[in-house]
Amino acid sequence: MSTDFQQAREALGARLRELRTEAGLNGKDFAARIGWQRSKVSRLENGKQTATAADVEAWARAAGVSETATELKGRVRGLETTHRSWKRQLSAGHRAVQENHGVQEAQAKVIHLFESGIIPGVFQTPEYARGVLTDVADRLGTPRDIEEGVRARMRRQEALYQPGHRFHALLWEGALHVVRCAPTAMAAQLDRLSSMIGLDTVTLGIIPFGVRTPFSPKHGFWIIDDRLVVADTWNAELWLDTTDDVAVYRKTWELLSASAVFDHKAHRLIMRARASLDIT
């Protein structure tokens, strides 16, 4: 089934093809003029490859319609707004991505988040974050600026202690048992998470194993000020800002929250996960 992202990419491809044919050039001649392989022209026109701003600017110039570059780059920005490849985002390393999220969180007033298999970045210890960022860099083959990424992620946590911010967090109990670092470091991470309970700016709920839930725990997502949803997949981060998308995720969060436990019951689940670690 075609996604909104793929449909938009195909629509951009059709527009690029239109500009090429209006210039009276076949694919081979156009590729020669622009200095690309013929296959790249074909992939872009058929929606098989995501164009960059530089790609469409070069395309407009080669087609003799430089004035369309602004329109084409606007279409590219629309693609990037909804679908941000992790490999592309991390091409310059972890630090830039962490700083970008930090700015977004510092500006937000209210964040609702759900994670099914990881402790959220704003609650992570340096050791846990180091394990996560190392795993990501190894899996995607991106730059290993691990320490800079860890420091940037730790700076994101300043928002937890600033008045006027609220973090409403839900975790599936499985996230407490996914070990992303050494067992002793994981124990410290769970202690850190437990310390979030009772913090003025944080509400922390845990969805227990075995409880009746209206959904299976799929991907994690963050709702920023009820205007933007940021959702993680294996290969990309989705940014969704339509009213309908935000409403769907907010309803999902509310239904998940109804299955969660809070306060001392949440603390008990965290400590149970800690006790299960082999740290003898």
Image (spheres, rainbow, N blue to C red):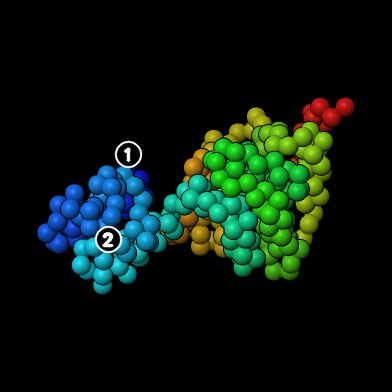
| Circle 2 crowding by C-alpha within 10 Å: few under 14, some 14–19, many from 20 | many
Q: In the drawing, does residue 48 fall left or right of residue 251?
A: left
Total residue callouts: 2
Residue at 30% x, 62% y is: 58
Residue 70 location, quadrant: bottom left
**Local SS, label 1:** loop
Q: Quadrant of the N terminus?
A: top left
Q: Quadrant of the C terminus?
A: top right
Which amino acid, mark 2? Trp
- Residue 232 rendering spot, x and y as whole percentages: 53, 46
Residue at 35% x, 65% y is: 74
Q: In the drawing, does residue 265 fall left or right of residue 167?
A: right
Residue beneath disc 1: 1
Marks 1/2 in contact by CB < 8 Å: the verdict is no
- Residue 252 rendering spot, x and y as whole percentages: 53, 47
Residue beneath disc 2: 59
Q: Nearer the viewer, residue 240 or 169?
A: 240
Q: Earlier in the sequence, mark 1 or mark 2?
A: 1
**Local SS, label 2:** helix
Judged from this view, the residue extending furthest toward the bottom is 67
Marks 1 and 2, Cα distance to the nearest angstrom?
Answer: 29 Å
